[in-house]
């Protein structure tokens, strides 16, 4: 795309790159913002159904689907108040810090094979790292508000998020270990084919660690039952007690953005990413289209259609994860802070560590392929990785020298 | 247009990140409000991670975000909040100390900048724009487990030493900061 | 003379490292708050890290330190984290004992 702009429009290189970057940022921002709007509406509907009522029904037709847009307009019109005791600079900046962190992680998140803002070599690591920065927005907001409720919320948040990053990191390592790569696109592509190729079905440890991951992810994005930072029964509204109007809504954008993010990460790491449960598209629809149009199956447009389907697939999986989180929120009561810490240190960390050890040993077993279903579909890349590992460092050296083993030939 | 046309994207972004790194680092040194210092430090270290990405060190950059910014600084802000009472938040320094410090620091900066531009091999432009080495993360991983692909010695032993060191530090810090019976001194002050 | 038209060299990175280092030195020298001094130490370590990465980068120079630079930077980051944890524990202990975190007040041995 950079080349296209350079050649046809005669733009200098840096301008073309900037235009491309702006377009990509715009797309991502659109996705995150629309996602937040849709999920806020969804949350109210889910909450309504679980509490045996209807939720919003009036704005915009039968399902009230314009409700969150109306809410947004209402928030825009609200007065932006800064308390007298607040540290005005940090108070004003904090919501943007939180939102920026939650949005930046999307830069390395692929939506389909090759559809990614910036392909980072250590993609998994990058996403988890940026996600951890969201806590700064909350801490600064809590501190700068100059209110005791906010400060308590921020302290709880700091303790909770730093603790939960440990099991979250351990959980994420397991699929990385199985796939042999930290590149999200490589991990996603390895799970092509039937759903038995998904990493969650690779071995028992992976299946167990998925649920640990989900728990830790819920805790690290501050959703109930772990939303101690804003526990409204004790702390009024926690860290955003003093906020109003648009700044307040930025916290919510950040929260829903990171919910979608951890769900999308779970989808890529455990649930096959952009590959559907049954390879119906690649096996049937794509050849069908090819025979109708007469194009070869690897032509640009058909590839594009395939990627589009993959993208829809990934977003559907991520949305399912978000709806699951909503379900959890409206079903379970909130934990106490000591129970939250106990959940992390006594259950999540040991479970994740045991799963990690199990996955390591599983990797060392010579024919670690107990599921014959795995062989139904071509997982050529995975086999290549396994061979590269088994043949030892000599082979790895050759591959890296030859420029082939970009990733995946290591651990 | 000719001036704009020759701009190097890599250089442009380098200057953006370098300016925010240096600017916020100086802001850390100049502010006397401890909470704002912590915030500026976060921004400075975050921009440094950006510089690492530009230098092709993706893994180190991600590590910087994860451990430095996400771990160490959260810990630091935690400490600030635990000790932040109004009289400690903003502690002034005397003008004399500022003058001495700025003299020494200015001299240091001049020497370092002089050294940075005194070696020809360092100022020589890279031969051509080349992409970052894609296998670097793999190589770092292998080097930490003792296998070096480019012929040097691995880092198995340092890695183990650092791991044990971290474990000791974890235990030690937990021991030092454990809750104790309230000290007499504190109860005197607060009645 | 447009500085943006030239590719980035190792020297540019060294300059950034120097500024970070000096900012850290200033921070360590003028702050009376123990945690402020700690932040100065972090800045200095980070300046060193920038240099390691610059020397290890193959994007900036052909004959670089290679892997050594990156791995050293990683070790620095890890050790900085360890150092911050211990220093913070000491600072909190000091605050508990003296109910201040002004380093100028830490001139008596009796805790």
Image (cartoon, coloured by chain):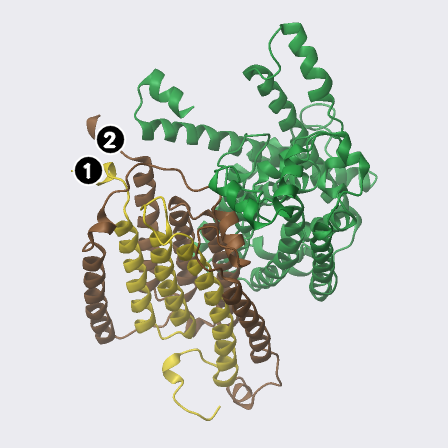
Chain colours: A green, B brown, C yellow
Residue picked out by circle 1 = C2
In the picture provided, is A75 more to the left or to the right than B48? right
Specify the subunit that label 2 lies on: B
Looking at the image, can residue A79 be seen?
no
Crowding at dot 1, Cα within 10 Å, few <14 / some 14-19 / many 20+, comes out as few
Residue A218: where, in percent of width, then height? 68, 50
Quadrant in the picture for the N terminus of chain A: top left
Judging depth in this view, the residue of B74 and B161 nearest the camera is B161
Residue B112's quadrant in the figure?
Answer: bottom left
In the picture provided, is A253 more to the left or to the right than C9? right
Q: Residue visible at 30% across and 39% down?
A: B12
Specify the subunit that label 1 lies on: C
Tag 2, which secondary structure? loop
Spatial CA span between label 1 and label 2: 9 Å
Looking at the image, can residue A301 be seen?
yes
Judging depth in this view, the residue of B186 and A172 nearest the camera is A172
Residue picked out by circle 2 = B6
The vertical placement of A299 against B180, above or below, is above
Tag 1, which secondary structure? loop
Residue B11's quadrant in the figure?
Answer: top left
């Amino acid at each position: 795309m950079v080349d296209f702009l350079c050649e046809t429009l005669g733009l200098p290189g840096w301008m073309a790159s900037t235009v491309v970057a702006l377009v990509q940022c715009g797309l991502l921002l659109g996705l995150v913002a629309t996602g937040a709007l849709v999920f806020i509406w969804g949350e109210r509907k889910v909450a309504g159904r679980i509490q045996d009522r209807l939720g919003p029904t009036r704005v915009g037709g039968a399902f009230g689907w314009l409700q969150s847009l109306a809410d947004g307009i209402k928030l825009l019109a609200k007065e932006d108040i800064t308390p007298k005791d607040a540290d005005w600079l940090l108070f004003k900046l904090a919501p943007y810090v939180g939102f920026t962190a939650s949005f930046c992680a999307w830069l390395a998140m692929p939506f389909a094979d090759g559809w990614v803002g910036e392909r980072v070599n250590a993609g998994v690591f990058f996403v988890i790292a940026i996600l951890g920065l969201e806590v700064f927005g909350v801490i600064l907001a809590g501190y700068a508000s100059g209110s005791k409720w906010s400060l308590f919320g921020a302290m709880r948040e700091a303790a909770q998020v730093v603790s939960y990053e440990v099991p979250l990191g351990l959980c994420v390592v397991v699929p990385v270990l199985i796939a042999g790569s930290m590149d999200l696109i490589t991990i996603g592509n390895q799970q092509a084919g039937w759903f038995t190729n998904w990493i969650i079905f690779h071995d028992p440890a992976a299946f167990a660690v998925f649920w640990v991951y989900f728990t830790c992810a819920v805790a690290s994005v501050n959703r109930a039952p772990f939303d101690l930072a804003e526990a409204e029964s004790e702390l009024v509204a926690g860290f955003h007690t003093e906020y109003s109007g648009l700044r307040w809504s930025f916290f919510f954008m950040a929260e829903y953005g990171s919910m979608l993010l951890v769900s999308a990460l779970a989808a890529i790491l455990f649930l096959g990413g952009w590959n559907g449960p049954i390879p119906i598209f690649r096996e049937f629809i794509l050849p069908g289209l090819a025979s109708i149009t007469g194009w070869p199956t690897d032509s640009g447009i058909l590839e594009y259609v395939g990627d589009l389907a993959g993208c829809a697939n990934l977003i559907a999986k991520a949305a399912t994860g978000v709806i699951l989180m909503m379900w959890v929120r409206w079903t379970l009561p909130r934990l106490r802070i000591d129970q939250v810490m106990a959940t992390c240190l006594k259950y999540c960390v040991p479970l994740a560590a045991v799963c990690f050890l199990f996955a390591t040993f599983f990797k060392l077993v010579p024919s670690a392929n107990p599921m014959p279903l795995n062989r139904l579909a071509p997982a050529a890349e995975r086999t290549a990785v396994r061979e590269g590992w088994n043949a030892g460092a000599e082979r790895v050296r050759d591959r890296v020298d030859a420029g082939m083993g970009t990733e995946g030939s290591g651990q | 247009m000719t001036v704009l046309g020759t701009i190097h994207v890599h250089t442009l972004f380098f200057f953006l990140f370098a300016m925010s790194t240096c600017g916020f680092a100086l802001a850390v040194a100049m502010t006397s409000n401890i909470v704002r210092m912590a915030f500026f430090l976060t921004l400075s270290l975050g921009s440094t991670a950006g510089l690492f990405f530009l230098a092709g060190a993706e893994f180190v950059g991600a590590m910087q975000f994860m451990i430095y910014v996400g771990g160490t600084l959260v810990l630091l802000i935690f400490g600030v909040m635990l000790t932040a009472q109004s009289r400690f938040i903003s502690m002034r320094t005397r003008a004399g100390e500022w003058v001495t410090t700025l003299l020494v620091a200015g001299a240091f900066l001049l020497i370092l900048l002089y050294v940075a531009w005194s070696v020809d091999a360092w100022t020589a432009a890279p031969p051509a724009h080349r992409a970052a080495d894609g296998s670097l993360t793999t190589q770092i991983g292998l080097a930490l487990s003792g296998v070096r692909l480019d012929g040097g010695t691995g880092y198995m032993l340092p890695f183990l030493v650092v791991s044990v060191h971290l474990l000791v530090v974890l235990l030690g810090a937990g021991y030092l900061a454990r809750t104790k019976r309230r000290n007499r001194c504190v109860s005197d002050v607060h009645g | 003379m447009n500085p943006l038209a030239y590719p980035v060299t190792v020297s540019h990175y060294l300059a950034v490292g120097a500024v970070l280092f000096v900012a850290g030195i200033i921070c360590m020298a003028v702050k009376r708050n123990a945690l402020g001094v700690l932040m100065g130490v972090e800045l200095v370590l980070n300046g060193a890290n920038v240099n390691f990465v610059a020397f290890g980068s193959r994007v900036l120079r052909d004959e670089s330190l290679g892997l050594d630079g990156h791995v050293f930077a990683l070790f620095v980051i890890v050790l900085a984290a360890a150092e911050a944890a211990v220093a913070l524990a000491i600072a909190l202990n000091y605050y508990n004992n003296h109910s201040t975190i002004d380093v100028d007040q830490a001139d008596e041995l009796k805790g």
